[in-house]
């Protein structure tokens, strides 16, 4: 199989000056919600590719990717500047284990993200599986500023459709708001503020998926381990699944 297929940009959403969502039409192999795929472009005569999570679930098109522009990064700035009709490279197959097929049975599913780490969770939440397998699903999304809490329209739609099972808990760390929790996720795990807001607890009937800033992932995992949860492995089922961005 070829390393790339051709993709065509069909939309570009600028959430902020730094955050973008790129919508791409491309013929790729079937994938699972939560996986990532490599995007690429020819830059100065060289193929440059980087992995990006798919925000869209498998049954919806076009492909959608949420990313932040990395200062001095070779690709993200190029992608952010792309307009409808422009072409880019797309890997033909998705990969990754941030999928519900890897998650053992539990009562409560916690999906905890910072920044663009929310992408794979939005794909998962727009499939039938979480609502069939878990009694309660909690989406936690942390950002520095309120305008970085992206996809609020999608989240509102999920909340309306799954009102009895779903809770959304936003965090904003660098400005006051009247709706989001302040501070950092790990501290809110440790002091109980997150459980209180979500109406759910971190116990041995929970499974927690962490995705985003590596420091958040490490610190949140430590806070959860202190509560008696353990990292999930195929040979040793546990309660915590992690994926760090960058």
Image: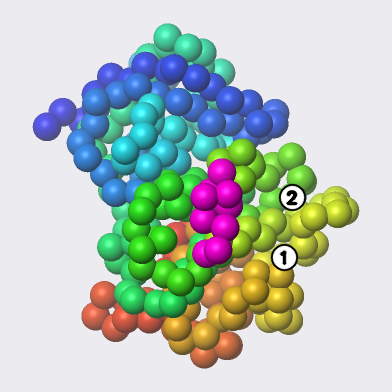
Q: Which residues are magenta?
A: 157-165
Residue 75 is one of the magenta-drawn residues: no
Is 234 located above or below residue 121 in the figure? Answer: below
Q: Nearer the viewer, residue 62 or 35?
A: 62
Question: In the picture shown, does residue 201 fall above or below 93?
Answer: below
Figure disc tally: 2
User: Looking at the rendering, in which quadrant would you find the N terminus?
Assistant: top left
CA gap, disc 1 and disc 2: 10 Å
Q: Is residue 186 visible?
A: no
Rendering colour mode: rainbow
Asked if the stretch drawn in magenta spans residue 160, the answer is yes
Disc 1 is placed on an element classified as: loop
Circle 2 residue:
144
Disc 1 designates what residue?
A: 184
Left or right of 144, for residue 124 = left
Of pointers 1 and 2, the one earlier in the residue sequence: 2
What's the mark number on residue 47?
none
């Amino acid at each position: 199989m070829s390393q790339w297929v051709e993709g065509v940009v069909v939309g570009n959403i600028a959430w902020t000056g730094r955050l973008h969502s790129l919508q791409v039409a491309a013929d790729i192999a079937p994938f699972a919600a939560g996986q990532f795929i490599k995007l690429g472009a020819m830059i100065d005569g060289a193929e440059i590719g980087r992995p990006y999570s798919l925000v869209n679930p498998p049954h919806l098109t076009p492909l959608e990717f949420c990313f932040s522009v990395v200062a001095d990064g070779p690709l993200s700035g190029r992608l952010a500047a792309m307009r409808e009709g422009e072409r880019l490279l797309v890997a033909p197959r998705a990969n990754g284990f941030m999928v519900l097929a890897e998650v053992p049975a539990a009562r409560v599913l916690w999906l905890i993200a910072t920044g663009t780490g929310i992408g794979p969770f939005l794909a998962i939440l727009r499939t039938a599986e979480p609502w069939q397998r878990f009694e309660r699903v909690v989406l936690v999304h942390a950002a520095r500023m309120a305008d970085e809490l992206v996809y609020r329209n999608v989240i509102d739609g999920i909340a309306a459709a799954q009102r009895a099972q779903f809770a959304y808990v936003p965090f904003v760390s660098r400005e006051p708001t009247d709706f989001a929790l302040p501070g950092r996720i790990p501290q809110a795990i440790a002091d109980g503020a997150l459980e209180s807001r979500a109406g759910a607890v971190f116990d041995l009937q929970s499974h927690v998926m962490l995705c985003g800033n590596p420091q958040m992932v490490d610190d949140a995992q430590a806070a959860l381990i202190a509560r008696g949860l353990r990292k999930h492995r195929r040979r040793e089922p546990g309660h915590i699944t992690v994926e760090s961005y960058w």
